Image (tube, rainbow, N blue to C red):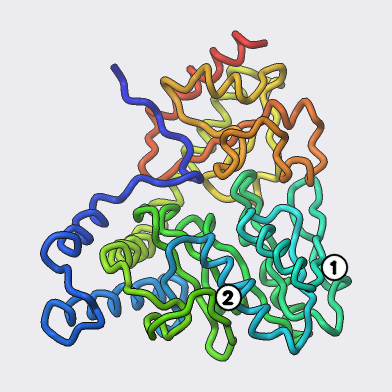
């Protein structure tokens, strides 16, 4: 039997074999506590230093501006809640958008219960935040803007540079959740102009359970955890050396193979869309504006084919998503599609298909056949 075609790379990625090889010694023989002064402890400490440097090199940051966390959710919490609490004397107003990941929106909801005011900006039919809306939302007490770099469901890339200009002009700190964009498009913190940036390991061919937060020098972040002095005291606790090493290696590979990987993601996505349109014609409707989406992400609706039914029908042969991976069991219409004013029937028929660096043309052709046959059967 042929292997199931995996087309849900935005949910998670397989671990790169090079990454697995790199981390293995740190769960077998290199088990020393990095806070220890003897040899195996020092080797763990040195491995963390190397990983931090590799991650910083990928996003054009300084190594000392990188804090390792357990995941993107923790990084978003640390960036938003940590900054808000540490800087509440400056103001209690935060600007975000209606299509952010739950780790952003729920953090903002919690801060609202503590007396902070949150402005939720709309998006257009392509899922894009209008920088003018950002500027109009700025108040004298605005301390933070948090807008994702690229959307996990539709793939829309936000105008981060324009928003960063507004933030800088008004002396407001700017955070972006780049969990979906790192390794798929250029992510350079200096070019983007951001002060805080979130990274997720398992979106980057590293294991689950590791993430990072870029904190620009001079930005004050309050603790969510309290303990010893690891990670500059911002994120205390004995470091998960093996996973930190893994993320570092994944970042090194992402930079080394960037052009090759992006070309493969883009070409496989294009072949997929062309194949589906050739088989299904006007039954296929793309959400978002392709020219401004991630190279690997396709949000597509199939006329008269309910998304959950379709995904279930093809699930033994092709893995696709019916919405945000964090809401995989939900039958409710995605808040992102709602915010984009996608018609109800179209939203209910939408699936997310995301390719990766391991996706082959043969897999795409097989997926086109399987999905098309299922859509025709349902309609």
Q: Return the residue found at the far top.
A: 377
Q: Which mark is residue 153?
A: none
Mark 2: give few (<14), some (14-19) or many (20+) Cα within 10 Å: many
Query: Who's the residue at 81% across and 71% down the image?
Result: 117
Q: Estimate the x, y position of residue 255 in percent, counting from the top left.
A: 38, 64
In the visual, does 187 lie left or right of 337? left
- Name the quarter where the N terminus is drawn: top left
Return the residue found at the far right.
136
Vertical placement of 13 versus 233: above or below?
A: above
CA separation, marks 1 and 2?
Answer: 21 Å
Numbered tag placed on residue 196 in the rendering: 2
Give the total number of marks visible in the rendering: 2
Tell me which corner region of the image, top left, top right, bottom left or bottom right, holds residue 112: bottom right
**Could you say which quadrant of the image residue 326 lies in?**
top right
Quadrant of the rendered structure where residue 374 is? top right
- Quarter of the image with the C terminus is top right
Depth order, front residue of 129/364: 129
Q: Mark 1 points at which residue?
A: 132
Q: Is mark 2 on a helix, strand or loop?
A: strand
Q: Where is residue 360 in the image (x, y as percent from the top left)?
A: 37, 35
Badge 1: few (under 14), some or many (20 or more) residues near its Cα, within 10 Å? few
Q: Residue at x 48, y 81 (%)?
A: 234
């Amino acid at each position: 039997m042929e292997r199931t075609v995996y087309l849900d790379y935005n949910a998670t990625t397989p671990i790169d074999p090079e990454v697995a090889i790199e981390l293995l010694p740190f769960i077998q023989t290199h088990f020393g506590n990095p806070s220890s002064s003897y040899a195996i402890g020092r080797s763990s400490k040195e491995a963390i230093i190397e990983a931090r440097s590799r991650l910083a090199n990928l996003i054009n940051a300084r190594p000392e501006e990188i804090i390792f966390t357990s995941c993107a959710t923790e990084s978003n919490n640390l960036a938003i809640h940590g900054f808000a609490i540490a800087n509440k004397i400056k103001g209690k107003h935060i600007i975000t958008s209606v299509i952010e990941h739950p780790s952003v929106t729920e953090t903002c909801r919690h801060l609202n219960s503590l007396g902070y005011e949150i402005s939720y900006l709309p998006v257009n039919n392509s899922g894009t935040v209008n920088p003018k809306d950002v500027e109009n939302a700025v108040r004298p007490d605005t301390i933070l803007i948090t807008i994702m770099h690229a959307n996990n469901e539709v793939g829309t890339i936000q105008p981060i540079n324009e928003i960063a200009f507004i933030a800088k002009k008004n002396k407001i700190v700017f955070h972006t959740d780049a969990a979906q964009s790192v390794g798929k498009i250029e992510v350079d913190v200096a070019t983007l102009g951001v002060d805080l940036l979130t990274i997720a390991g398992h979106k980057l061919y590293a294991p689950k359970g590791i993430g990072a937060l870029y904190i620009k020098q001079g930005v004050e972040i309050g603790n969510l955890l309290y303990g010893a002095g690891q990670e500059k005291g911002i994120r205390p606790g004995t470091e998960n050396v093996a996973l930190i090493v893994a993320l570092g290696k994944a970042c090194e590979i992402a930079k080394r193979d960037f052009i090759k990987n992006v070309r493969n993601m883009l070409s496989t996505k294009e072949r997929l869309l062309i194949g589906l349109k050739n088989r299904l014609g006007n039954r296929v409707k793309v959400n978002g504006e392709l020219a401004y989406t991630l190279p690997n992400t396709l949000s597509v609706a199939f006329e008269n084919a309910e998304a959950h039914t379709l995904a279930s029908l093809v699930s033994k042969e092709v893995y696709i998503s019916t919405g945000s991976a964090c809401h995989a069991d939900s039958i409710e219409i995605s808040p992102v599609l709602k915010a984009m004013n996608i018609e109800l029937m179209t939203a209910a028929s939408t699936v997310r298909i995301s390719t990766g660096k391991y996706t082959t043309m043969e897999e795409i052709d097989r997926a086109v056949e399987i999905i098309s046959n299922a859509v025709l059967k349902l309609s």
